[in-house]
Image (cartoon, rainbow, N blue to C red):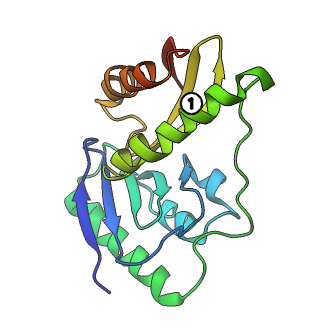
């Protein structure tokens, strides 16, 4: 099995492309630690068995791994490649059970605005961010403020705030006049 790797804007995160589906049609899943991965993904749990893995993000066709500052990618990358290869060769499913979408903080009178926001996020923002090994997840809308969570390589990335404020916020305000600002929330 040949796995390609790509750098991301976050120097602590590397994107691994196994050349096959990871989550497929399921939503991308962000695991902030081993406890969150337990029982939900054998692949993520196996990656967290490495002491210097700090975050695992499973996208449609990629795996983003965030490392601790204590180790270089030169030392950790072969271990991660081996873990991913061994897992996919086993034929086991990446995700266990069903993955439910998180609840959103949205009032019924904002449903139409939220629909337009989510459409823009799904068609314009998320594909671009996935190219960098991450995701932006909608978490709510209230009084003109859109609440988004940065995931994968985007979580903790030095440029994530600029992406959110200057890129996503400006685009949403342009196409959805009801949007006043965008705020980042933690998952």
Can residue 67 be seen at all in this image of the molecule?
no
Quarter of image, res 80: bottom left
Query: Residue 88, position in %: x, y?
Result: 47, 82
- Residue 149 left/right relative to 127: right
* Residue at the image point whose x is 54% and y is 46% from the top: 32
**On the image, numbered disc 1 is attached to which residue?**
186
Closest to the observer: 24 or 134? Answer: 24
From the viewer's perspective, is residue 26 above or below residue 176? below
- Residue 38 left/right relative to 25: right
* Residue at the image point whose x is 35% and y is 30% from the top: 160
Furthest toward the left, the residue is 74
Can residue 130 be seen at all in this image of the molecule?
yes
Closest to the observer: 31 or 146? Answer: 146
**Image quadrant in which the C terminus is located:** top right
Closest to the observer: 116 or 183? Answer: 116
* Residue at the image point whose x is 44% and y is 83% from the top: 86
- Residue 178 left/right relative to 62: right
Closest to the observer: 4 or 36? Answer: 4
- Residue 117 left/right relative to 159: right
**Image quadrant in which the N terminus is located:** bottom left
């Amino acid at each position: 099995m040949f796995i390609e790797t790509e750098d991301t804007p976050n120097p602590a995160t590397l994107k691994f492309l196994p050349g096959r589906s990871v989550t497929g049609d399921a939503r991308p899943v962000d695991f902030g630690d081993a406890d969150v991965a337990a029982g939900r993904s054998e692949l993520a749990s196996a990656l967290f068995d490495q002491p210097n893995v700090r975050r695992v993000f499973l996208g449609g066709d990629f795996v983003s791994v965030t490392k601790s500052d204590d180790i270089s990618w030169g030392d950790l990358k072969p271990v991660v490649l081996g873990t991913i290869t061994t897992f996919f060769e086993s034929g086991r499913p990446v995700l266990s059970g069903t993955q439910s979408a998180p609840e959103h903080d949205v009032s019924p009178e904002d449903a139409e605005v939220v629909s337009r926001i989510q459409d823009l996020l799904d068609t314009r923002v998320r594909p671009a961010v996935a190219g960098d090994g991450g995701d932006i997840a909608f978490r709510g809308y209230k009084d003109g403020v859109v609440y988004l969570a940065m995931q994968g390589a985007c979580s903790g990335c030095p440029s994530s705030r600029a992406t959110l404020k200057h890129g996503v916020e400006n685009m949403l305000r342009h196409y959805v006049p009801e949007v006043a600002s965008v705020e980042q929330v933690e998952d």
